[in-house]
Image (cartoon, helix red, strand yellow):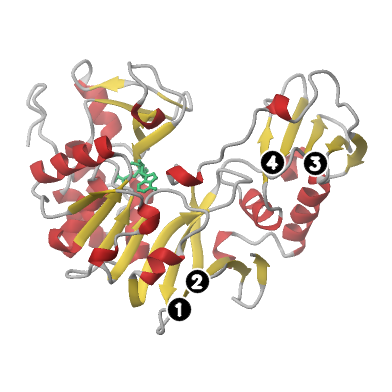
Amino acid sequence: MTDGYGGRPDSGRPLAEAGFVPADWAPAFAAVPRTAFLPGLMWPHDAASGRAVAVDRAVDPEAWHRYADADVPIVTQWDDGAHTGTAPGTVFTSSSSMPSVVASMLTDLDVRPGRRVLEIGTGTGWNAALLAHRAGAGNVVSVEVDPVVAESARQALRRAGYGGVRVVTGDGLLGHPPGAPYDRVIATCGVRSGLFTWVRQTAPGGVVVAPWGTYYTYTEATVRLVVAGDGGSASGHFTRPVAFMRLRAQRLVRPGHSAYVPARGTGDAERSTTTVTEAEFLTGDLDVAGFAIGLRVPHCTHVPDRKQAGRRPVWFYGLTDRSWAVVVFRDGQDTAIVHQSGKRRLWDEVSAAFRWWQDQGRPGFRRFGLTVTADRQAVWLDEPSNVVSR
Ligand SMILES: C[S@@+](CC[C@H](N)C(=O)[O-])C[C@H]1O[C@@H](n2cnc3c(N)ncnc32)[C@H](O)[C@@H]1O
């Protein structure tokens, strides 16, 4: 395969030889170049600016290949396809995931030749092709909600020699019952609930791998569930933090700030102080504290503001009512001012959850696990019996 822009061949070697691809997946990464699944115009994450930047293969093939072969996520669709033009859109709605995350999730999935695999979120089709290389194309079904994205993946898969992969246009939350039972199910979009539908379509002893999280933060963690012998439940530990775009129906939609907080001042909000510090509370991207707080504080999201003049407000919004709270951290001060309004005392809930996480010894992602049955999902710490969130 060549690129048509100067004859540079598509090659899977740069990624196959990257340190994050385990030896048993290297042949698949070498045989299935990511470049064969990326559109001419794409928006890779640029580490220097921390933003998505437009790169057009026809304009700058060198940069296009550099990003395609780098360990970065690449946005391939904005705003459910409504966006046009080169500048980034508002919400990224399809992408080629970060190759190191792709490799780690495939490793968790434990795919072998002949295993039947269901993928949720076809996107570019690259992951489906990697699965097909390992399991056999006829054993892979992939469901994509967006018909335009699905069709372009079908074409890319065909061109790359994996036309046997069945790409279904539809809602992946429903799985794909005609192909069941599967031995492996992998979701490549974030999920909050509804995993039992996939469990039901998986054979006993089969594995379901999915990015799972709450609405409190964008931080999710990959969960690896093993389906019980009777098929009535699936359970397993989280493995590592990830940040995926969510299933369409499970995106966070909340009213804007002004729907919660008065335009001037803090209205009748109750004022207090806290000894929680900015340094301990905002530990950075993909932080496990945020993941843990989200488990203990349902129906709440938070937005840290940019720091200005040594002052950083962090806002909390209720998702089932208009309760809100803000904690204002200031450099050099031992206590921070808190304002809380509405039926809930969101900062009290959040700070209690944060202290709980500290008291447990600040557990990392791997100490948490998830069990799903037909009528509930429960997150636990260390043991399935130690439920921390339902
Ligand atoms: C991160 S991308 C998938 C990356 C893909 N596996 C690849 O190799 O390029 C997530 C995809 O999930 C799709 N998606 C979102 N909600 C979905 C749903 N309910 N059912 C199926 N696909 C969905 C999005 O349209 C998007 O294409």
Q: Which of the marked residues, 1 or 2, is nearer the chain's N terminus? A: 1
Q: Which of pointers 1 and 3 indicates the residue nearer the eye?
A: 1
Mark 1, ligand 1, within 8 Å: the answer is no
Q: Is residue 372 above or below residue 5?
A: below
Spatial CA span between label 2 and label 4: 36 Å
Q: Which label belongs to residue 282?
A: 4
Q: Which mark is residue 277?
A: 3
For the residues labelled 1 and 3, the Cα–Cα distance comes to: 44 Å
**Between marks 1 and 2, how big is the CA–CA gap?**
7 Å
Q: Dot 1 surroundings within 10 Å: few (below 14), some, or many (20 or more)?
A: some
Q: Which tag, 3 or 4, sits closer to the chain's start?
A: 3
Residue 317: x %, y % from top left: 71, 38
The numbered mark at residue 374 is 2
- Image position, residue 267 (x, y; %): 88, 26
Viewed as shown, does residue 34 lie left or right of 10?
right
Is 159 on the left-hand or right-hand side of 21? left
Q: Secondary structure at mark 3?
A: loop
Residue name at image x 11 percent, y 55 percent: 164
Distance from label 3 to label 4 (Cα)? 8 Å
> Please, what is the three-letter code of the amino acid marked with disc 3?
Thr
User: Disc 1 marks which residue?
Assistant: 232
- Residue 323 in percent (x, y) is at 78, 40
Choose top left, top right, bottom left or bottom right for residue 204: bottom left
Mark 4 or mark 1, whichever is nearer to me:
1
- SS of the residue under disc 4: loop
